[in-house]
Image: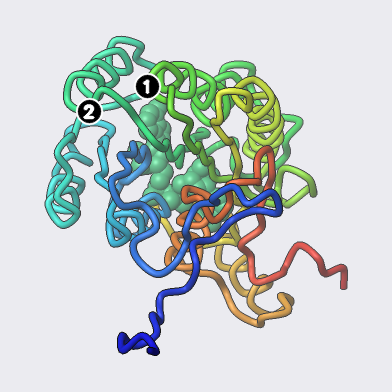
Amino acid sequence: MSDPRPETTDPPAPSDAAGRPTPRTAPGPLLAGRRGLVVGVANERSIAWGIARHAAEHGAQIALTFQGEALERRVRPLAERVASPIVEPLDVTRPEQIDALFARIAEEWGALDFLVHSIAFADRDDLSGRTIDTSRAGFLKALEISAYSLIVLARAAEPLMSAGGSVIAMTYLGSVKAVPNYNVMGIAKAALEATVRYLALDLGEKGVRVNAISAGPIKTLAAAGVSGLRGMLGQAAGRSPLKRNVSTDDVGTAGLYLLSDLSAGVTGEIHYVDAGFNITAW
Ligand code: NAD
C-alpha cells in the first residue's frame, strides 16, 4: 500500500562533496544566537550603525561602545533600538577602557562571535592640503586610532573567539589610489588593509576570519572631516557603474554576509562596496 502522508517539501540538509553537513544558510536569521561587538557607532548615520542594525535584524545580540559623553547621548537610544545588553565607553587610545569592555563581555557572554571595527581618526589639518606637511604627531595619531586599534581589539577578542569568529574593518579606496585630501588617512587605510591580511593569517587556524569592506564615500561625521567630500560623492555617483552612491544599508548587508556563515570560506579580503567605482578608470 502506498504511504498516505504527503511528500515532504523540506529541502534536503546541505552537505559537501564528501557528504559532510555544511551550514544551512537559508531561510532564517543568519546570525541567530551570535554575539558581536560593534565599535564605531557615533550616530544614526554611522556605517557601524548600518551593520549593527542588520546584524540585530538577523538575530545577533550586539554590544555597542561610545567615545566620550557627547556621543553617549546619541548611542544609548540606538542601543535600546537593538536591545544591546552591553553599552560601554571606549576610546581605543585608553587601554583601561579596552580592558574594562572585554572584561564586561567575558562576564556577560563568556564568548564573542564577531567584532566590527568601524573607527578612524585624523586631525582635520591633515585631511586637506599636502600629505608632505603631515606632522609626526598627526601621523602617529591617525595610524594608532585607525589601524593599530584593529590589532588591539582583535587581540582582546581572540580568547573569547575559541569557537571561531568573524572580524571586519572599514576601509576606503584612498589606501591604494592617491585621493586628493585623504592624505594621511590613505596611509592609515593601507596599514589597516595589511593588518587585515596579517590578522587573517594569525587567526585563521582558530577559525577566526578577518576581512575589510572598502566603502564608497558616505556622508557621515568622520567623512565630513575630509575636505572636498561633496566632490567625492558627486564623482563616485557619476562614474560608478551603478551610477549612484552607496548607503549604510549597502555596507550593512555586505557586513552581514562577512559576519555570517555565508562567507565561511572568505578571509583576508578587501571587499569593495562602492557601486563599482574602483573598477573604473575614466
Ligand atoms: P562616523 O563618524 O560615524 O564613525 C567614526 C567612529 O570612529 C565614531 O564612532 C568615533 O567615535 C570613532 N572613533 C574615532 N576615534 C576614536 C577613538 N580614539 N576611540 C574609539 N572610537 C573612535 O563615520 P563613518 O564614516 O561611519 O566611519 C566608520 C569607518 O568607516 C571609518 O573607519 C571610516 O574611515 C570608514 N569609511 C568611511 C567612509 C565614508 O565615506 N563615510 C568610506 C569608507 C570607509
Where residue 167 appears, as percent x and y from the top left, is 50, 36
Q: Amino acid at mark 2?
A: Trp
Q: Which label is found at residue 212?
A: none
Answer with the quadrant where ligand 1 appears in the image: top left
Q: Is residue 280 shown above or below 168?
A: below
Specify whether 99 is left or right of 170: left
Q: Residues within 10 Å of mark 2 (few under 14, many from 20)?
A: some
How far separated are the C-alphas under marks 1 and 2? Answer: 9 Å
Specify whether 65 is left or right of 222: left
For the residue labelled by badge 2, is the local secondary structure a helix, a strand or a loop?
A: loop
Where residue 202 appears, as percent x and y from the top left, is 64, 20
Report the front residue among 93 and 259.
259
Q: Amino acid at mark 1?
A: Leu
Q: Which label is found at residue 160?
A: 1
Query: Which quadrant holds residue 2?
Result: bottom left
| Residue at 46%, 20% in the rendered image | 158
| Residue at 31%, 26% in the rendered image | 111
Q: Residues within 10 Å of mark 1 (few under 14, many from 20)?
A: some
Image quarter where the N terminus lies is: bottom left
| Residue at 18%, 19% in the rendered image | 107
Protein image colouring: rainbow
Where residue 251 appears, as percent x and y from the top left, is 50, 60
Query: Which quadrant holds residue 57?
Result: bottom left
Single out the residue that lies furthest toward the right: 282
Report the front residue among 17 and 92.
17
Taking the image as drawn, is residue 131 in sight?
A: yes
Image quarter where the C terminus lies is: bottom right
Specify whether 267 is left or right of 51: right
Q: N-terminal of the two: label 1 or label 2?
A: 2
Residue at mark 2: 109
Report the front residue among 235 and 18.
18
| Residue at 52%, 41% in the rendered image | 168
